[in-house]
């Protein structure tokens, strides 16, 4: 089956902001943290929040203290007043677009306008908007209701931010026929506009449409209604388990879109399930694929890439071929530290987890035991060859790596410093591993060279090798994070894409890659590095190529993404090995 994916999918701005706020509060506050109603209409995301101790206040009627986050839909002002009266601390995460509509209504109500709201009467957002309009406020949901409504002039029309554009236009036209002094607000948010436009265009290119999102999500239901309005069979599902495989098997080309509150890994799982329809054996059950997935999700593949990077960086620095113990140390370090930090995220009880997170939680005990053995084995291998300086450096790297997810700052200082662990530092998930890889893959072998005085004369080679290793690892981590933004934020990770945003991150990564190419050219041209530097220019070229690929196939499997992004490191090792074999 061919699956065509809509360009716009995943969390919208309002959902991202609300998610950011509630996770930050949960990290900083000592007391209980609640949301007023489900934070978003995605049971899977809500389950993950619950596993982090963030509860729905409506499910805890006896609660009398703590912090309550107002979700993106907003609430009537009297609800806020009631919560404050009960002793709760209020944090308002109402979507900026909804806030703009609320202020618009308040301003026009104060000027004597009648307020007409186009939306679903029982929706939380509409209830909040209506509370700002006073006695001269009515709600309509169809053009027929608009033709029957009686309101004094002047009047203004405001839409629920996730309302159907076509229906809103019909309602506005019906009201203009009867109300001379009518002001119409453009209050449907851009994310809603994009998704609605795309689903209409997508439906023209496919035989059926699948819409992914919570059954209680208004914007997701609207997408499904629009798809059905085109006459194409439409399936609204929350997860891949809800797919009607028998019905979908009749179609050759299917369109896929997702609501503004749908986590991207849920959309990915539906995409892969659709692609499996008609296959004798599902892709995920294919034995070679399962083995490959285990190697990538357990970080064995990345550990092998660390070995390749160590070999290439040593060649670039002019270091004699590194002892096998250093290659083993790089392998063990990357596997052990990455595994231990992922396990430190906690167990949790949520279902429908991202594949890599689910893998770690299923195999937590054996992965922990293997990691401890690898830590000890790598240190012993360096001790056996008498590489004491490298061993001490590796001990320090292990200590910092394990401390990455450990609380270092007392809770009473967290609000002042805005972080409690190294992993809370902005962009830490991308920056710290890159620095650690430089220490283990480059500096440790360099320290054990027989003649450090002679090596000091080649400090430019060492510096370029460090830059080479840092950029390759940093870019690898950042590109993976571009596809994992929602997963990372739900798990409390601070990555570069979360801090800078997707567009700025892409530009930054591309610029950094071009700068690496310039450094390699300079080093090889003036003789600071061996001629292998010319050959390693293929690595920045590869990075730019997979950036182009990644941006166009954003929902690719996490296994495929890991293989592709580790490819630059594996390529570096292969090129360096080929260089050493040339007579």
Image: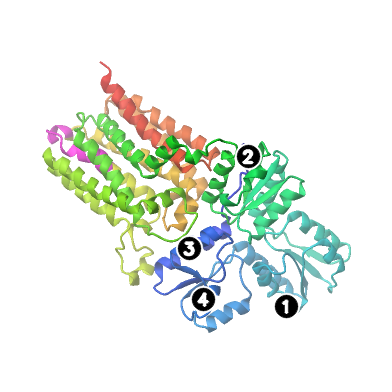
Residue that numbered label 1 is attached to: 134
Q: Give the Cα distance between marks 1 and 4.
A: 30 Å
Q: Earlier in the sequence, mark 2 or mark 1?
A: 2
Residue highlighted by disc 4: 60
Q: Residues within 10 Å of mark 4 (few under 14, many from 20)?
A: few
Q: Is residue 192 visible?
A: yes
Report helix, strand or loop for mark 4. Answer: loop
Viewer-side label of 2, 4:
4
Q: Is 444 one of the magenta-colored residues?
A: yes
Mark 2 surroundings within 10 Å by alpha-carbon count, few (fewer than 14), some (14 through 19), many (20 or more): some
> Is 187 situated above or below 10?
below
- Is label 2 or label 1 in front? 2
**Residue bearing the label numbered 2:** 4
Question: Looking at the picture, how far across and down is residue 393, in whole percent?
Answer: 19, 46
Q: Is residue 9 above or below residue 48?
A: above
**Can you say whether 578 is above or below 227 in the image?**
above
| Front residue of 559 and 530 | 559
Q: Quick one: quadrant of the N terminus?
A: top right
Q: Is residue 299 a member of the stretch shown in magenta?
A: no
Which part of the image, by quadrant, shows the C terminus? top left
Counting residues from the start of the chain, the first of labels 2 and 4 encountered is 2
Q: Position of residue 335 (x, y in %)?
A: 30, 44
What span is in magenta? 438-455
Whether residue 79 sits left or right of residue 104 in the image: it is left
Q: Callout 1 environment at 10 Å: few (<14), some (14 to 19), or many (20+)?
A: some
Q: Which residue is mark 3?
A: 49
């Amino acid at each position: 089956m061919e699956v065509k994916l809509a360009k716009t999918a995943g969390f919208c701005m309002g959902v991202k902001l609300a998610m950011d706020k509630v996770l930050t509060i949960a990290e900083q506050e000592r007391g209980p943290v609640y949301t007023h109603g489900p934070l978003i209409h995605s049971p899977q995301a809500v389950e993950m929040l619950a596993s982090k101790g963030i509860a729905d206040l409506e499910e805890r009627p006896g609660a009398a203290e703590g912090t309550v986050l107002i979700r993106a839909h907003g609430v009537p002002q009297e609800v806020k007043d009631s919560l404050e009266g009960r002793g709760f601390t209020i944090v308002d995460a109402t979507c900026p677009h909804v806030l703009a509509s609320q202020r618009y209504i308040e301003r026009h109500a104060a000027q004597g306008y009648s307020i007409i709201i186009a939306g679903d009467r029982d929706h939380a957002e509409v209830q909040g908007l209506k509370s700002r309009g006073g006695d001269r406020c009515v709600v309509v949901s169809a053009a027929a209701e608009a033709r029957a409504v009686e309101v004094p002039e002047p009047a203004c029309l405001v839409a629920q931010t996730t309302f159907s554009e076509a229906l809103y236009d019909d309602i506005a036209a019906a009201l203009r026929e009867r109300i001379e002094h009518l002001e119409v607000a453009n209050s449907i948010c851009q994310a809603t506009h994009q998704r609605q436009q795309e689903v209409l265009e997508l439906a023209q290119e496919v035989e059926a449409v699948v819409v992914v999102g919570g059954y209680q999500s208004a914007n997701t239901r609207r997408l499904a209604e629009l798809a059905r309005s085109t006459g194409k069979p439409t399936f609204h599902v929350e997860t891949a388990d809800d797919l009607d495989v028998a019905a979908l098997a009749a179609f050759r080309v299917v369109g896929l879109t997702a609501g503004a509150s749908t986590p991207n890994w849920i959309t990915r799982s539906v995409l892969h399930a659709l692609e499996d329809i008609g296959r004798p054996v599902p892709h995920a059950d294919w034995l070679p694929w399962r083995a490959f997935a285990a190697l990538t999700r357990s970080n064995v593949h990345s550990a092998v890439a660390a070995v390749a990077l160590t070999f290439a960086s040593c060649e670039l620095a002019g270091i004699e071929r590194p002892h096998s113990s250093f290659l083993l140390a790089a392998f063990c370090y990357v596997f052990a530290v990455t595994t231990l930090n992922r396990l430190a995220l906690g167990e949790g009880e949520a279902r429908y987890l991202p594949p890599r997170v689910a893998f770690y939680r299923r195999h937590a005990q054996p992965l922990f035991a293997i990691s401890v053995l690898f830590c000890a084995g790598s240190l012993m291998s360096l001790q056996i060859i008498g590489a004491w300086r490298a061993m001490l450096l590796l001990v320090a790297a292990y200590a910092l790596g394990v401390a990455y997810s450990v609380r270092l700052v007392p809770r009473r200082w967290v609000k002042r410093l805005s972080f409690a662990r190294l992993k809370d530092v902005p962009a830490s998930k991308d920056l710290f591993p890159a620095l650690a890889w430089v220490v283990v893959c480059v500096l440790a072998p360099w320290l054990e060279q027989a003649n450090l005085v002679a090596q000091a004369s080649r400090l430019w080679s060492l510096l370029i090798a460090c830059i080479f290793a840092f950029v390759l690892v940093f870019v690898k981590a950042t590109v993976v994070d571009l596809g994992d933004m929602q997963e990372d934020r739900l798990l409390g990770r601070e990555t570069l894409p979360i801090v800078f945003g997707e567009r700025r991150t892409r530009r930054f990564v591309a610029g950094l890659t071009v700068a690496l190419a310039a450094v390699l050219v300079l080093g090889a041209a003036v003789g600071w590095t061996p001629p292998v530097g010319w050959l390693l220019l293929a690595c920045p070229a590869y990075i730019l190529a997979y950036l182009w690929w990644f941006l166009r196939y954003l929902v690719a499997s996490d296994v495929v993404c890991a293989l592709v992004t580790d490819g630059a490191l594996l390529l570096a090792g292969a090129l360096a090995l080929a260089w050493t074999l040339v007579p």
